[in-house]
Image: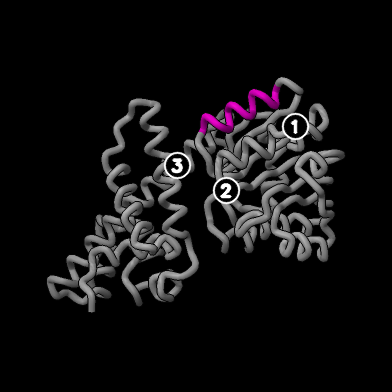
Amino acid sequence: MKIAFIGLGNMGAPMARNLIKAGHQLNLFDLNQTVLAELAALGGHISASPKDAAKGSELVITMLPAAAHVRSVYLNEDGVLAGIARGVPAVDCSTIDPQTIRDVAATAAKQGVVLGDAPVSGGTGGAQAGTLTFMVGASAEHFEVLKPVLAQMGKNIVHCGDVGTGQIAKICNNMLLGISMIGVAEAMALGNSLGINTGVLAGIINSSTGRCWSSEVYNPWPGIVETAPASRGYTGGFGAELMLKDLGLATEAARVAHQPVILGAVAQQLYQAMSLRGEGGKDFSAIIESYRKAE
C-alpha cells in the first residue's frame, strides 16, 4: 500500500520503520533531514511537503507534536488536504485535544476525505517493537479500513467511538496515570522517611489494595523495578514535559465540559513545578524527587 507518513519524531520514525518492514511504500515528510535520510535508505520516498506526500497515497498517517501542527499539516496551502484524493482515508495519531481533530475532520469531510484519530500508548519502546495500543476514534467502517495497517504498528487496536473519542480515551487514561504516579511517589517517600525498607514496602503495596501500574511496573523508587526509568537515573521512558502536556489537555477539556478534575489539576501543577525546576526532560516518575530529602 502507498502510505503518506508525516511526522517522524521519537514515535513516528519507528512506526514508519515498521510499515516499511511490512512492505508498504511510504511517502515521508518531516523537518528532520537526518531521520528522513535514514528512512529513505530503508526504501521510503522523501516528499517536499505534506501535500506532496499525500498525492497518490492510498492512506495518510500523521504523528505530530501538538494541535497547531495538526491544523497546519492538514489545512495549510501545502497541507494534506491540498494533495489527498477524494475518498482516501486518513488518521492522525498525535495526542491533541478532541475538538481540534473534530474540526479538522469536519473540514476534510467537505472534500470527501474521512479523517479519524488514533493516539497511542506504549511509548518509544512500544513503537519500536510494534506493540503499541491505538485508541481509535472513527466510524465503524473507517475503523475497519485502518485496523489492518495499525495492527502492523501495534498489538491492541481499540475502537473507542466516533472521531475525537480516541483523544478522550488517551487524555483520561494519562490523567489517571499522572495522579497514580504521584500517589505512589508520596507513599514510597513516606515509607522511606518513616523507616521501612522500600523494597519491602513496594512488595506489600503490590500484593495489597494499593497495587497499580505505577507501583508494580514503573515504581518511581530507584532499584525496585530493574527495567523502570527510576533504576537508570530517570532517563528514557515518558518525559515529564509530555505528561504535563497531557494533563493540560485533560484540564482544558474538563474546563470546556464544566467537569471538575480536582486531582488532575493538582497533578498538573506538580508537573508544572517540576518543569519550572528544569526537570521536564526526566521521566515523569522523577516526580518522586519532589518528596525526597536532599542526600
Q: Quadrant of residue 131?
A: bottom right
Q: Determine whether the residue tagged by mark 2 lies in a helix, strand or loop.
A: loop
Mark 2 or mark 1, which is nearer the start of the sequence? 2
Q: Which secondary structure is most common in the magenta stretch? A: helix
Q: Is-magenta flag for residue 28?
A: no
Going by the numbered disc 3, the residue's amino acid type is Ile
* Left or right of residue 83: residue 239: left
209 versus 54 height, above or below: below
Q: Bounds of the magenta span?
A: 98-109
The numbered dot on residue 81 is: 1
| Residue, disc 2 | 65
Q: Position of residue 170 (x, y in %)?
A: 48, 43
Q: Residue 207, can we see it?
A: no
Going by the numbered disc 1, the residue's amino acid type is Leu
| Residue, disc 3 | 171
29 versus 129 height, above or below: above
Going by the numbered disc 2, the residue's amino acid type is Pro
Q: Mark 3: give few (<14), some (14-19) or many (20+) Cα within 10 Å.
A: many
Q: Quadrant of the C terminus?
A: bottom left
Q: Position of residue 178 (x, y in %)?
A: 36, 51
